[in-house]
Amino acid sequence: MRPRLELLEPALVERVLDEAFQLLCAPGVRVQSAAACELLSAHGARVADGVARIPEELAHRSVSSAPREFWLHDRTGKPSIHYGGDAVHFAPGSSCLHVLDAETFEHRPAISADLVRLVQVAESLPQYAAQSTAVVCDDVPETIKDFYRLFLVLWHSEKPVVTGAFGLENLPFMIDMLAAEAGGQQGLRAKPRAVFDVCPSPPLTWSEFAGQSLVELARTGVPAEIVAMPVAGAAAPVTLAGSVAQHAAECLSGIVIHQLAQPGAPVVWGGAPSILDMRTATTPMGAVETAMLNAACAQVGKYLGLPTHGYLVGGDSKIADAQAGMESGMAAVLAALAGINMVSGAGMLDFLACHSAEKLVMDAEAIGSALRLVQGIEAHGASLAVEMFRAAEHQTDFLKLPETRRLFRSEQFLPSPVTDRESLSAWVESGGKDMLARSRERVRDLVADYTRPAIPGDVEKDLLAIVRERAASAGLHTLPGI
């Protein structure tokens, strides 16, 4: 039995969707992309003064044409991440501006070397099924920051990638890099390696960039991940149920635009909802209500049969401390129980503004435990305990049994040395280090042991040609991070 978390009664899910469909008609959705407005108008939506009023029937039709599942592939073309059903995967958070110096606790602007280090750590940890374009590199020209961070991830990793563009200018070049790896546009459509986050602006607004991105991604067949971000109490109703309804309306409107551009193109019901802290006017990503919003929004998406995404395992603490561990551990368990297909956010601090390689390895411990939890408890063989007692009787000799050696690795999640399970004396003898100190050592060891995956020569040549031309156009003539 797989343990599950569902926060909405079936009748409440229906009510959420009913109100979401009402919102699509009144007040409607602001759509600033001319191409998206043309698609909506041509298929029955009433568009006037930049507001599209989308009939419920059109929304239903669009949901029906969206795939129920799809796969992301690794560099070699192997299916690696299943979007659909109850599959659960985790990825580092994306787009931080800062990194945490684990020695001085300074938050400083991220540079290319920081992104490479984060990629090396995530590449070495099996808890992360995907990479992300984790930081925005301050040593790269503003006009190509989105493009260049994707290049660095492709250069240093084999895993699938959660990414996104900051503007329409670089989106074609980012897709060209992925196509160069996949053997062309058809290969990319058949075996996509990356999913692109596309964010509506709360409440109920698709900017020109976001709306056009949905259209472009659908037509190229590259999966789009709609990341709706209602902030309960500020840019969304203060009630959690009301925010879930707004989230549903924003996702539904995005799916309509996306599926009108290309029916059947892969799309994800995703989000980064949060509450507003009424004392500090911040958006706490480690709050339990934020986790509840993510779980409830995903539940609505699963009810519609769509692949899902959420933003959890990040936190609000400024350093990788006990608060960060508490927030990440709680969120990882809730996300896994909710069956969210892709959970982004690991490694992040300070309301998702700062990344930390040390927190990334801490979070991997929580993720490993959460993934073990959702495997549940199974019976192995015809006997649960009787046969083993026949062998061991009243002796404490279960450690000698062949069943113990055969099954303990599947029965238990074995944490890394980041998690302390030594005796007190052994802990003292090894230096009495706390979790942050052990995480520093773990990061150091992972980076030292990392080997860059081999890229076929022709692919490497094509990638470099694309990057050098684009970088030169932005005034960058030496490529940092490679």
Image: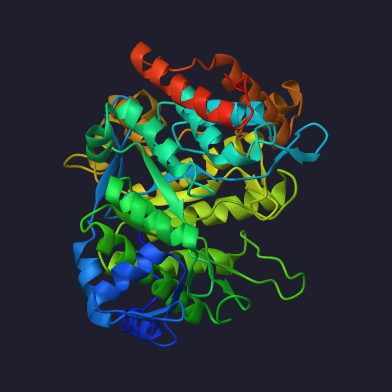
Q: How is the image coloured?
A: rainbow
Quadrant containing the N terminus is bottom left
In this image, 354 relative to 39: left or right? right
Using the rendered image of the protein, determine whether residue 74 is visible from the camera's viewpoint: no
- Who is closer to the viewer here, 354 or 89? 354
- Who is closer to the viewer here, 119 or 377? 119
- Who is closer to the viewer here, 437 or 46? 46
Residue 434 in the image: x percent, y percent?
73, 35
Quadrant containing the C terminus is top right
Is 19 above or below relative to 314?
A: below
**Residue 456: quarter of image:** top left
- Most extreme residue toward the left is 382
In this image, 429 relative to 355: left or right? right
Which residue occupies 32% across, 34% down?
A: 393
Is 311 above or below relative to 14?
A: above
Is 146 above or below relative to 469?
A: below
Residue 419 in the image: x percent, y percent?
60, 35
In this image, 144 relative to 452: left or right? right
**Residue 397: quarter of image:** top left
- Most extreme residue toward the top is 457
In this image, 239 relative to 443: left or right? left
Which residue occupies 37% across, 31% down?
A: 409
Using the rendered image of the protein, determine whether residue 215 is visible from the camera's viewpoint: yes
Residue 226 in the image: x percent, y percent?
41, 59
Residue 13 in the image: x percent, y percent?
34, 78
| Numbered marks: total | 0
- Who is closer to the viewer here, 142 or 255? 142
